[in-house]
Amino acid sequence: MKKLACAAFALAMAGCAATSESGKGRGWLAVSANDNKAVLDAGVTKAVPNAAPDTVALIDLAATPPRLVAEIDAPASVVGPPVSVAVAPDESIALVTAATRIVDGKQVPDNKVSVIDLQSSPPRVLATLTAGPGVAGISINRAGTLALAANRNEGTVSVFTISGKSVVPAGKVTVGDDKSGPSHVAISADGRTALVTRDGDHRVSVLAIDGSSVTHTKRDIYAGLRPYGVDICAPGGAAVIANIGIGQGDADTVSVIDMRANPPRVVDTISVGQTPEGIICSPDGRLVAVTVMSGSNKAPNSPFYRANGRVAVYSLDGLKLTKVGEADVGNWAQGAIFSPDGKRLLVQNMVQKEIQVLDVDMVGVRDTGQRIKLKGGPAGLRTATQ
């Protein structure tokens, strides 16, 4: 049976490789980090006793509909933005962070980063690295030589150098104190700048990158209340920030940062609804998807409760966001990704332990009814940056 499973995975991955070689390029392999340690109970996140192992799942976006090709045990966490995965540009490895672990029945900060070999059959954990406590959002530069990870409980960003499938810790950069809550790091297309969201003290820090040397420029941007998710849209002139607010039922916001300004600065902020958990740009930079909890993570008796979350899609014209549509998704929705051609949008539904498949274009977003079932609650989702 094990040989048959390996053969099936090899066949599926050969299809992904053929897609790349046929001229479609990279990015057709999605990686989902799935947490089994946490459950939402009447609006409260609780630790699961005797939880099954967390998992990492590989999804073939080139298939119609997209399909699960492998799912292996590896540490993950729903704590932090749903970008706890980074995929190397050549799709050789993925880095998956684990912000929490269970000790005596309680979730406590963890510091683990797993290096996943995406080319082995089946995929496997190559190495487990140490970052800072509460390590959450992580990104790899487009050259595939550097990774940065935000350490929520330390006020730092961990630096890793990459050579092939070898990933080596290369120090840390302090951006704030241990309450500043670094959440995610987005790296610019030229690899020379990074933005770090800090939901603990409501700032976005600007980092300068020179090779493997990473420094805090001391430029901090004030985008909104609790900046959390961040993405820098192609070709690189705009970044979008999801400000998740304090969860009291008020509408929260997304801010646009002008990356070409010197120094970078917020130029617009729009209202998007309750708790914009995830935010992602389409590969061509023309669309931005925001997963909005919309009260779906509240207790049913809360006046702010809504049975479903939402995914809202905006067009990005220069530095201006304009809404083009929205669709209902599941509860406690987490990450989202576009297919490389921008025609499909995948959204993680944490409570339902599934990934929802939607069609998307410049005039709207539509649920296809297709679902990808997973062993754990999906909590982080990425593809290789194009």
Image (tube, grey):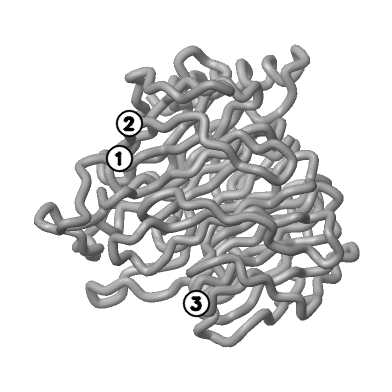
Q: Quarter of the image for the N terminus: give it.
A: top left
Mark 2 vs 1: CB contact within 8 A: yes
From where the camera sits, is residue 130 visible? no
The residue lying furthest to the right in this view is 210
Q: Which residue is mark 1?
A: 353
Q: Quadrant of residue 78?
A: bottom left
Q: Nearer the viewer, residue 346 or 275?
A: 275
Residue 192 vertical position relative to residue 367 in the rendered view, above or below: below
Secondary structure category for the residue under label 1: loop
Query: Which residue sits at x=42%, y=25%?
Result: 357
- How packed is label 2: few (under 14 Cα within 10 Å), some, or many (20 or more)? some
Residue 274 image offset from top left, x and y in percent: 36, 54
Query: Which residue sits at x=66%, y=43%?
Result: 320
Residue 46 vertical position relative to residue 376 in the rendered view, above or below: below
Residue 34 image offset from top left, x and y in percent: 40, 47
**Which badge, 1 or 3, comes first in the chain's sequence?**
3
The circle drawn on residue 373 is 2
Query: Which residue sits at x=57%, y=75%?
Result: 132
Secondary structure category for the residue under label 2: strand
Mark 2 vs 3: CB contact within 8 A: no
Residue 97 vertical position relative to residue 58 in the rendered view, above or below: below
From the viewer's perspective, tell me whether residue 70 is left or right of residue 102: right
Q: Which residue is mark 3?
A: 200
Q: Nearer the viewer, residue 240 or 88?
A: 240
Three-letter amino acid code of the residue under disc 2: Lys
From the viewer's perspective, tell me whether residue 374 is left or right of residue 172: left
Query: Which residue sits at x=33%, y=64%?
Result: 247
**Which badge, 2 or 3, comes first in the chain's sequence?**
3
The residue lying furthest to the bottom in this view is 177
Three-letter amino acid code of the residue under disc 1: Lys
